[in-house]
Image (tube, helix red, strand yellow):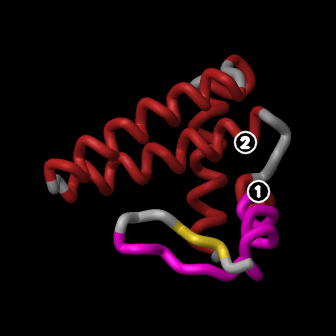
Amino acid sequence: MERYSDLERGVISWAIDREIIPNSTPMAQGIKTLEEVTELLSATQRGFRGEMQDAYGDILVTLIVGSRLAGFELLDCLEHAYNVIKDRRGTLRSDGVFVKDA
């Protein structure tokens, strides 16, 4: 966890130094996240692992910055999402559809 915290602090400092924080917006970072996800899908489809790794990292950067601009800590958002899904039961079918248990 310490490694992640150090990296998150580094991303925030980087964004402040470049005036992304406070001059960007959660919406602008959301759009940037979508661009990075599109790059991830393209790299995944082509099997380009180096580009996939870069895209995953870029997505995390945009999420860290966007959540901070929205007044959240990204780990708090993750914890909230986990608390919603942790007791969810079901299975992923071979066609990629998750079916929740009743």
Q: Where residue 78 sits in the image (x, y, percent)?
A: 71, 62
Magenta-drawn stretch contains 88: yes
Dot 2 falls on a residue whose secondary structure is helix
Q: Mark 1 or mark 2, which is nearer the start of the sequence?
A: 2
Magenta-drawn stretch contains 27: no
Q: Quadrant of residue 53?
A: bottom left
Badge number at residue 3: none
Residue at left 67%, top 24%? 27
Decide if residue 47 is on the left or right side of residue 63: left
Residue at left 62%, top 55%? 8
Q: Is residue 33 above or below residue 51?
A: above
Q: Is residue 93 above or below residue 76?
A: below
Image quadrant in which the N terminus is located: bottom right
Q: Nearer the viewer, residue 39 or 9?
A: 39
The residue under label 1 is 77
Residue at left 51%, top 29%? 32
The residue under label 2 is 67
Decide if residue 25 is on the left or right side of residue 40: right
Residues at circles 2 and 1 in contact by the CB criterion of under 8 Å: yes
Classify mark 2: residues with Cα within 10 Å, few (<14), some (14-19) or many (20+): many
The kind of residue on which mark 1 rests is: Cys
Decide if residue 34 is on the left or right side of residue 77: left
Q: Label 2 vs label 1: CA separation?
A: 8 Å
Q: Nearer the viewer, residue 74 or 34?
A: 34
Q: What range is drawn magenta here?
A: 77-94
Dot 1 falls on a residue whose secondary structure is helix
The kind of residue on which mark 2 rests is: Ser
Image quadrant in which the C terminus is located: bottom right
Q: Where residue 70 sits in the image (x, y, percent)?
A: 80, 35
Q: Where residue 91 sits in the image (x, y, percent)?
A: 53, 79
